[in-house]
């Protein structure tokens, strides 16, 4: 479980996270909805240790993320991974090398075992057979799937998706959604998705959280979300 308690972050006197509090449960898919610019990416960067908060706490499976020692921090970092909005692959590395990179960097694994793992993850995203291609030789949707395979390679407990379907055509978006569903049902990875796209809620969410003015203004399951009389939520639902 991820517990975020009263997280605060200011940039140039602007409160981006303002007492942000949320519990994210394991083995569920949580969608955090919020308008563009409300601080979703900033939140994910805190959860993955890229940014430090001004105040508040993040506790991941009982381990405190902030102001911790390097040993615990490394322990936590192994548990989670972030899939950026843009695939962010290395252009000069093949699909195989991109996906294998975290194993080459962080483990002493023999190449034979690396290969087995890479194939396993490429299979999850439906890309077996594309190992030797360069990113420039595959479509954007395929690049996105490679970035998901790379995120999965160290077997994280939690995977964070930043706008996983924004800007993709509907067929590719559908494909990404089916991969996210597969992660929950077959791989056992807990997904946290931040998006301004309400359709994500209907397609994959077990739990929904809505962010506004730097904090969470709603949490609950789909039926509670749909029944809400809150005009801001109703506005979102009508998009
Ligand atoms: N490193 C930074 N320095 C200063 N301001 C920043 C920094 N990172 C983010 N911000 C500001 O924080 C606010 C929230 O940004 P963020 O990227 O988290 O929004 P978002 O909800 O992810 O938006 P979108 O849906 O468009 O991706 C913005 O006003 C942004 O300019
Ligand atoms: Mg963003």
Image (cartoon, helix red, strand yellow):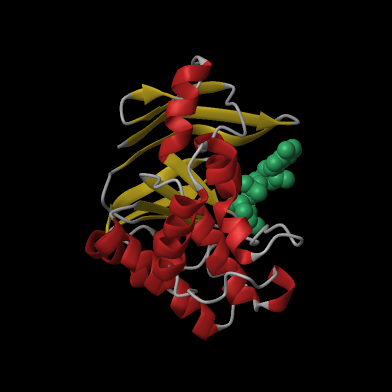
Q: Nearer the viewer, residue 166 or 211?
A: 166
Q: Nearer the viewer, residue 6 or 46?
A: 46
162 sits to left or right of 229? right
* Residue 228 image offset from top left, x and y in percent: 29, 60
- In the rendered image, is residue 152 in sight? no
Q: Nearer the viewer, residue 34 or 50?
A: 50
Q: Nearer the viewer, residue 35 or 71?
A: 71
1 sits to left or right of 65? left
Tell me which residue sits at (44%, 41%) in the image: 80
Q: Quadrant of the N terminus?
A: top left
* Residue 15 image offset from top left, x and y in percent: 63, 34
Q: Quadrant of residue 136?
A: bottom right
Report the residue that reaches farthest toward the bottom: 171
* Residue 158 image offset from top left, x and y in percent: 39, 46
Position of residue 231 relative to residue 213, above or below, is below
* Residue 148 image offset from top left, x and y in percent: 51, 60
Tell me which residue sits at (42%, 52%) in the image: 210
Tell me which residue sits at (63%, 71%) in the image: 132
């Amino acid at each position: 479980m991820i517990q975020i308690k009263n997280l605060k972050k200011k940039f140039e006197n602007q409160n981006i996270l303002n007492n942000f509090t949320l519990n994210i449960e394991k083995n569920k898919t949580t969608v955090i909805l919020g308008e563009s610019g409300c601080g979703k990416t900033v939140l994910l960067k805190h959860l993955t240790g890229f940014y430090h908060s001004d105040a508040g706490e993040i506790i991941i499976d009982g381990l405190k993320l902030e102001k911790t020692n390097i040993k615990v921090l490394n322990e936590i970092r192994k548990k989670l991974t972030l899939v950026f909005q843009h695939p962010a692959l290395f252009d000069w590395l093949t699909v195989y090398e991109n996906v294998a990179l975290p194993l080459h960097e962080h483990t002493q694994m023999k190449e034979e075992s690396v290969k087995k793992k890479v194939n396993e993850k490429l299979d999850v995203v439906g890309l077996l057979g594309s190992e030797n291609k360069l990113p420039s030789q595959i479509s954007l949707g395929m690049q996105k799937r490679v970035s998901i395979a790379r995120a999965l390679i160290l077997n994280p407990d939690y995977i964070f998706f930043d706008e996983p379907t924004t800007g993709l055509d509907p067929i590719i978006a559908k494909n990404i959604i089916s991969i996210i569903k597969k992660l929950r049902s077959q791989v056992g990875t807990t997904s946290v998705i931040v998006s301004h796209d309400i359709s994500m809620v209907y397609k994959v969410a077990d739990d929904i959280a809505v962010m506004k003015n730097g904090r969470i203004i709603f949490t609950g399951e789909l039926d509670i979300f749909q029944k809400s009389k809150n005009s801001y939520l109703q506005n979102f639902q009508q998009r």
